[in-house]
Image (spheres, helix red, strand yellow):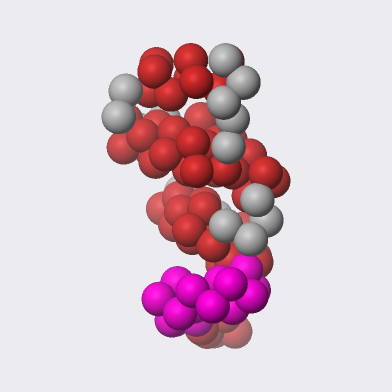
Amino acid sequence: MNIEALEKMIARGQDSAMLRLTLGNAYAKAGDAEAAIGHLRQAVALDPGYSAAWRALGRLQLRGGDEAAALETFRQGLAAAREKGDMQVVRELEVRVRRLEGKSRDE
């Protein structure tokens, strides 16, 4: 989706966690990790139970090399996914958390 159109929606007061997730993903795809992370953080601030936004934020942090931040984000996303019963996200984040915890123990 067009980043400019999404930004205009926010400017018109149509802000939502889903819009922020979409915008974060669009910025990530465009190569602007800083803007993407900002929008994904806003998505989880607007809806702390939005497990898909937590997952997207953690993935982006991990791609950027911030494993500690990604681990914490994945843990928060895992809690949100469990609360909502989003089992697909639960399974994915359980694996990611285990891997990152294993890496931190190895160091």
Frontmost residue, 5 versus 105: 5
Left or right relative to 49: residue 54: left
Check residue 83 for magenta coloring. yes
Q: Is residue 57 above or below residue 105?
A: above
Is residue 3 visible in the rendered structure shown here? yes
Q: Is residue 93 visible?
A: no
Q: 84 or 32, which lies in front? A: 84
Q: Quadrant of residue 27?
A: top left
Magenta stretch: give its range: 78-95
Taking the spot 48% from the left edge, 58% from the top edge, the residue there is 52
When asked about the image quadrant of residue 46, the answer is top right
Direction from residue 12 to residue 99 in the image, left or right: left
Q: 10 or 106: which is nearer to us?
A: 10
Image position, residue 54 (x, y; %): 55, 57
Please state the horizontal and vertical placement of residue 19, each as a whole percent of the image. Answer: 49, 36
Horizontal and vertical percent for residue 15? Answer: 59, 30
* Residue ID at (63%, 39%): 42
What percent of the width, then of the height, locates residue 17? 57, 43
The quadrant of the image that shows the N terminus is: top left
Q: Quadrant of the C terminus?
A: bottom right
Image position of 10 with respect to 95: above or below: above
Q: How many marks?
A: 0
Magenta: predominant secondary structure element? helix
Name above or below for residue 79 compared with residue 61. below
Magenta segment: does it hold 57?
A: no
11 with respect to 45 (left or right): left
